[in-house]
Amino acid sequence: MAQQPAKQVIPVKITAPVKPAVKSPDTNSLHFIFDKGNYRLLIISIAVVAFGFILMSGNTDIYSTTKIVIAPLVVLGGFTIGFFAIFKKPGNG
């Protein structure tokens, strides 16, 4: 019979279990760029722009004052409200 090689014994180091890291509660909180007032103004501006485009559509009278003058001014007013909503600092009036 052939002689079998001797088994080597490898020492094992036993360590204490590692506790999971506890995260502080503020790391999981969401921080939005805009506040409620900014979002409200953005929704109002979208509604005003949509109303301006509705004014531009309509009957076959192409050269009416509503389609040429009033509707584009309403759309520009809606875009102005949107820009104001974006640039307004959160928390101010």
Image (cartoon, rainbow, N blue to C red):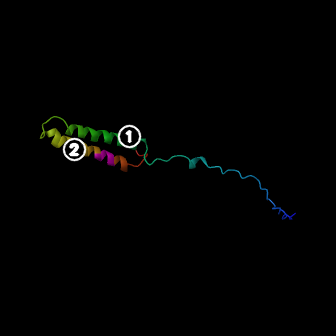
User: Quadrant of the image for the C terminus?
Assistant: top left
Q: Going by the picture, which residue comes out furthest to the top?
A: 59
Name the amino acid type tagged 1: Arg
Q: Name the residue at 32% across, 49% down.
A: 83
**Mark 2 falls on what kind of element?**
helix
Q: Position of residue 85 (x, y in %)?
A: 36, 46
Q: Residues within 10 Å of mark 2 (few under 14, many from 20)?
A: some
Q: Residues within 10 Å of mark 1 (few under 14, many from 20)?
A: few
Compared across the picture, whether 15 is left or right of 57 comes to right
Compared across the picture, whether 78 is left or right of 27 comes to left
Q: Name the residue at 17% across, 40% down.
A: 67
What kind of secondary structure does the magenta stretch mostly adopt?
helix
Magenta highlight range: 79-83
Q: Quadrant of residue 7?
A: bottom right
Residue 69 painted magenta: no
The residue closer to the viewer here, 24 or 93, is 24
Q: Which residue is mark 1?
A: 40
Per the rendering, the mark at residue 73 is 2
Distance from the alpha carbon under mark 2 to that under mark 1: 21 Å
Q: Position of residue 44 (x, y in %)?
A: 33, 39
**Mark 1 falls on what kind of element?**
helix
Q: Going by the picture, which residue comes out furthest to the front?
A: 1
